[in-house]
Image (cartoon, coloured by chain):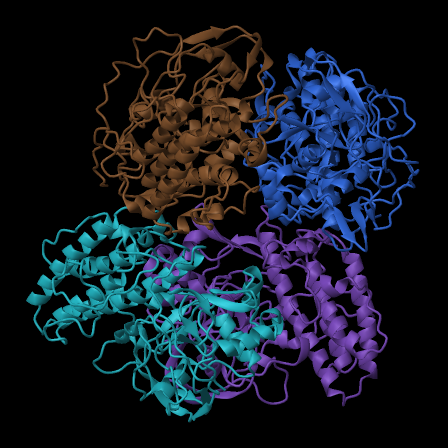
Chain colours: A cyan, B brown, C blue, D purple
């Protein structure tokens, strides 16, 4: 069932792939009955999460592409399935018959190695296949994948690795799907809700920002060891940094309102030239999704239009806004090396997809840790252009197109957000977006 | 039910407005049990036709806007309802409460007098209101409208006229909805069908075109009398034309293939300058929806991709192509006055929406009439720019925006098409589109 | 010599083609010593006028293309020469060697029959050939042309006609060159002058507009007889018009200010839909070249920035503005047939290029004629789309591209302007521009 | 005098500022008679060089803006003067009267601190001020500047530093002016020459590329000490690099042809995603200015169209092409730190502006140095995005806009080119352009 005022039911669990009805919110970490570490269980769980995220949607909500950068929910559902079918089943299963040969191109995102991708900006022009047909596609591929996994020995490391990548890929699209849905609902004058907001515990007071000193010197960053990581997180390598200080918590909406009130969007000297051009061309006066009226700021959330909460982290800002805010504050953004050095050793906990707030939360003013909100809540823009680590080798085959070819004109974000699945979050994870992008759940942590 | 291979069920009839299930294809002329001439009956019938045209659609099909010029089916369904609510109920019913005040702007097409219309190119960005909600809107407005009609005396001519306009407006959108759906399905690589094609009786042979002479002199054209007509068909006025000849039937696909084979799309001397620019900028090589492969031409129809039938009228050509074809043929297009003079006195019969072919048909090679296909099949481009008749007075109020403000840069088409409801077709009806438009069911009749 | 404060010297006369120095402003009607009716004399005179119009220009002024629609003065100088070389010398003179074979394409405007024209919007990217080289080109072609004319017998009617067309073509470019220079100077913040303004005799008072009745019925319009005319003025044919009234003189700046003050640019109901879109997209608030400041309106003229003179005809309005003004006035624009019928029999006199004001003048308030300003001052927008007269046959060969291919999306203007050479002005002359164009010297005469 | 076949005269020297006639090619290092180290002498010399570079130009050549990124020569001449007037004379000279107050905005490039800059893409729309007027402006500002310099004591370090910046700024524009002129001449089908090519000594053979090893570790890069440098070269700081190898000389045209022949422009796997998009959108098939015909490659040079010389360094490639070439070669581009470390200690000699070839030269195949062509010939694209050095502080005042605000979406180039004045070239100089830019004299040195 779908409706604007939809209330999310309690999670349940249903092992049968292929029956969506009656099973909602079966989150990854809690919902499989066999060994939760088994690949099979994890495959089922991850796939189930994607489907559960669709529960509040009406069929119409799956179709719309509200801007070129966003994709219809239907496309996310199909593309993640395409990834398993095209990169794994077709390659590994002798005699595998594609579910529909037209999907090879239709649901290819950007892998030129595989086929000519269907034009990105036209994803919203496709009413067919229908949502039902796409869920049929999912079920068929899931059945083949589970069959393959069950036959796959522990020693078939390459295949298991590909499946892991497929699961991580799916988690990325869980996040993107929510991100894109938020944008779609935001452009609708009816301001629909994806989900009813949970009641928030009001933060007693705004926290004063503390500066936490971190020692410089030669540090190692990047991925090493046996855990999962994308190619762009390697190789682990040494970097030389100077001593620095990093803010204890994120820039808040109250902080950002002070910037707005001080004419931050009107002072060219605070902005990079490209940023200033964006401010003027797109008439930016606030973060994305904010609107002003009747003397107050409101913003669009996945639970509809709300008053801006002062102590929450500011969200939906571009790199340009993060950079201008830092300059206005007399400090700067951290580099990605600084961020990773500071975060090393911290426990990965926070407000992720699984908390089902789908919204960043205020810092806890009684916490004793040096750093709050390092993981979850909002991605943190860094000052670092997204480029290869020294000695970077792209993955082989089609996966070489996964990360490496985007190493240009983007900036690194770190730490995950409130719509990032917990399992996607890693100390070394490098997210990247163009400096003008604002529809991601991205915010600001300052350094100096 | 909706599906790509949907077979249209037999028409039935259900008087209860508000129950779509079980009632399909209840066409206007056959489906009301009370006096079919009564306004109430006609209101119900026209509204029912619109809904019946939606039967083959899945919810997803209602959402997509495949180009700026086209609108989602959902929007057509809502906008025709908006017309009755905003222009009639709000104006006539004391204390009328709008179904949803946001709809006033959301479903306004272009009436600046009423509200700021929602941005046209963004109609496909709205997943909400859902199809169900929009049908609820229809039902609510229908109930109020029927109530109003029942209270409305025969003498309330102004109100009855407004309602008539609303019904004619709705019929125009029945045509546009099918036209837009065809475009939407055409851009989808899966080439979905709206409906299973009827079996066609093959035309035994191509007809040879005859030239029918028509006497010039002073003739009167335009609407007069008490029947319904739009403001732009008036006033009836005298025109002076020279003797001319008009082709007995429409230009066929076979005719047009000869133009293509003679490099018609490659010879600048055949084209208006703006047409030649369109040919080059958009790389036109054939009518819209045609594609060439494996040595044959195929085209997209509302029943999917088919071989081009030689003796059918060519369809989905722009004014530029019609004009270039005429120049290549050594003749010209008729003016709208010539067309109307030649058509005066002909019976209005032909292949309209009600025949449910949704596709133009070949001429009947044993017919004895001078003219075939004058009404229905395809709109006929004329050589006449769309301008006001001498002494034209736009309708009053918001309806002044209905026709008059478009009298610039468009050309007149005459005669109706296979997706035009029979009741929309009139001798004096002036349809108009920009010379580069190709998604209408438009073809060519030659004159000299 | 060129300078912003250049004062135009007295006309002199110099028969030697090829010596520009010392000869300025040798106007067509006064400057040849042999029979002024002879083709040779007229050729020399027309060419000399073009050159004299360049006298106030610095070399830099010849180079700039201030918008896609405008051309550099250098290009006009070269293209008019190209016309004689390519269409006449190459066709008529055995063994003729082109001055520079690259010019065939470089200075082709739009004749696809001849060569691929150099891209229109790039005309301002060419610093070479230099002005000097282009004048060398003129001299060389002039020498060949005069040689050809001297050898050309009276009976070689076809050739003589081609030369006549070349001269009329050149006169059109004299007008366009001034029109384009005005635009170029207008976008320059320094607001340079082309020429020092003559002192104006102040108009004692604004004239009150009179309505002159004209009888309808069957009239003939279009060109007939042996005089020169373009193909699009033929064939002469009968038209049927109703009785109408035409304004005695042009709409003035004072009239137009009243429209502005009544929020004419802010009321959608006054505008065609395409016009309203132009108003909003381009933020029109006044005619082109007007600017408001310090409580008064000023406009750019060919003598720099001046206060708007109230009783002068309004100029540099688009068709959309002319149409909106007429609607605001409760009347309409005349059709081109009405204009021609009303103007039939009037003497062709007025404020043309030769008066060297390069600016429209106020009506004479003591004149006794029914109509003032019918010829000269400003082109008069008509309500008529530019289309073929019944039975129109384009000229043969490359000249078929001269007029016919533009018969789409443009409107007819009549009567000539203050920058039109007297010899270009004809009762039947049909000028045509797109309805959004404003850089022509175009104004408004009302009808009803 | 200017002409397409202009031969550059021998340099002479004339101390009188303000007399261009008779003084050409007075190059900076040789042309002042007073102490060549004096600021006065250097001011005169630098300004003279700019003017001498204009000698081959016709007035028309000064006007054209051949693309948005390029500026008219006239604008360069004026803007460099504006820099001295606005940033120095207005600030330092009490009661200074601007030459023309409109120039403050008209010749402002991008300093929002000073005024609203005239729109960049419209610089070619200005025929006025004329070249003569702009040289008058130069002379007037030069007179005031020399007066100021003569009054300026050795101790007025801040002022002297500003003047130094002005001179370095002017040298940058000397390079840009030639770069822009090359583009302008290239789009002209006549392919004009700026200067007659010197006879080239043919390189006996292609050199084989050697790999020169460089030790990693902690190195210092960036500017320190008392010499001139821009703000973005500071602070000098430590970097940690791994051992690497750098190519002994630049990638040649022959090398690049092998890439082309191996379908380098057709293989998506060689390109960054943004690069691949540029290849397809702009149909890149070779470096800028190359054209293929009659079985051979030719390119546009400042001496017109020539056969591509195999052993010269490839030039006019974008970062994307440099990066794709490196990937095709199995290696990579150096970082800017690597480049600077390798170049440390090398003598700054090479093919600069002063050699008057205005074209990169082949490596000397008998040279014994490890590295050739490190300075001069072509700018070398590095793998480094252009960002701030750690601790970067922008200059104060308007000069804060000089470098810092562009630290986004650009890549660093190092080493100078054949159109860079010798005095502009520094070990630590950081040039930067967008990765798609190709009109700079930029080439490739490989690393691994």
Q: Is residue B43 visible?
A: yes
Q: Quadrant of the C terminus of chain D?
A: bottom left
Horizontal arrangement in the rendering, residue C187 relative to residue B247 (left or right): right
Q: Quadrant of the N terminus of chain D?
A: bottom right
Horizontal arrangement in the rendering, residue C200 relative to residue B415 (left or right): right
Residue B102 in the image: x percent, y percent? 46, 51
Residue A283 in the image: x percent, y percent? 56, 62
Q: Is residue D373 visible?
A: no
**Closer to the camera, D180 or B22?**
B22
Residue C132 drawn above or below residue A158: above
Horizontal arrangement in the rendering, residue A328 relative to residue A336 (left or right): right
Horizontal arrangement in the rendering, residue D355 relative to residue D12 (left or right): left
- The residue shown at (62%, 67%) is D175
Residue B160 in the image: x percent, y percent? 48, 27
**Closer to the camera, C144 or C214?**
C214
- The residue shown at (64%, 56%) is D194
Residue C113 in the image: x percent, y percent? 55, 29
Q: How many marks?
A: 0
Residue C189 drawn above or below residue B191: below
**Closer to the camera, C266 or B415?**
C266
- The residue shown at (79%, 79%) is D92
Determine the image quadrant of residue D383.
bottom left
């Amino acid at each position: 069932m779908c409706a604007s005022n939809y209330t999310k039911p309690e999670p349940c669990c249903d092992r049968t792939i292929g029956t969506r009805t009656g099973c909602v919110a079966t989150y990854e970490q809690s919902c499989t009955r066999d060994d939760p570490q088994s690949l099979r269980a994890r495959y089922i769980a991850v796939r189930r999460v994607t489907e559960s995220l669709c529960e509040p949607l009406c069929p119409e909500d799956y179709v719309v592409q509200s801007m070129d950068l966003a994709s219809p929910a239907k496309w996310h559902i199909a593309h993640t399935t395409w990834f398993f079918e095209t990169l794994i089943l077709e390659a590994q299963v002798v005699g595998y018959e594609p579910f529909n040969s037209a999907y090879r191109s239709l649901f290819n995102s950007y892998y030129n190695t595989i086929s000519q991708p269907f034009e990105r900006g036209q994803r919203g022009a496709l009413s067919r296949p229908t949502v039902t047909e796409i869920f049929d596609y999912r079920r068929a591929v899931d059945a083949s994948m589970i069959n393959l996994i069950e036959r796959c020995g522990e020693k078939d490391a390459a295949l298991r690795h590909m499946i892991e990548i497929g699961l991580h890929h799916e988690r990325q699209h869980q996040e993107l799907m929510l991100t894109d849905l938020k944008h779609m609902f935001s452009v609708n004058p009816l301001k629909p809700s994806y989900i009813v907001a949970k009641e928030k515990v009001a933060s007693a007071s705004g926290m004063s920002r503390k500066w936490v000193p971190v020692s410089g010197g030669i540090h190692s960053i990047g991925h090493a060891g046996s855990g999962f990581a994308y190619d762009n997180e390697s190789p682990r390598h040494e970097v030389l940094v100077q001593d620095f200080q990093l803010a204890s918590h994120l820039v808040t909406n109250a902080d950002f309102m002070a910037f707005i009130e001080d004419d931050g969007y009107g002072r060219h000297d605070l902005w990079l030239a490209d940023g200033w051009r964006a401010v003027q061309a797109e008439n930016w006066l606030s973060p994305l999704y904010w609107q002003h009226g009747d003397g107050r700021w409101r913003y669009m959330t996945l639970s509809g239009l709300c008053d801006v909460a002062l102590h929450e982290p500011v969200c939906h800002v571009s790199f340009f806004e993060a950079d201008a805010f830092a300059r206005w504050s007399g400090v700067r953004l951290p580099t990605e090396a600084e961020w990773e050095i500071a975060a090393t050793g911290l426990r990965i906990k926070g407000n992720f997809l699984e908390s089902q707030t789908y919204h960043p939360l205020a810092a806890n003013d009684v916490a004793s840790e040096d750093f709050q909100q390092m993981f979850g809540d909002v991605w943190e823009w860094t000052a670092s252009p997204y480029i290869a680590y020294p000695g970077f080798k792209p993955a082989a085959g089609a996966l070489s197109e996964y990360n490496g070819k985007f190493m240009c004109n983007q900036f690194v974000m770190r730490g995950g957000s409130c719509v990032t699945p917990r399992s996607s979050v890693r100390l070394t994870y490098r997210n990247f977006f163009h400096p003008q992008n604002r529809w991601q759940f991205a915010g600001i942590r300052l350094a100096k």
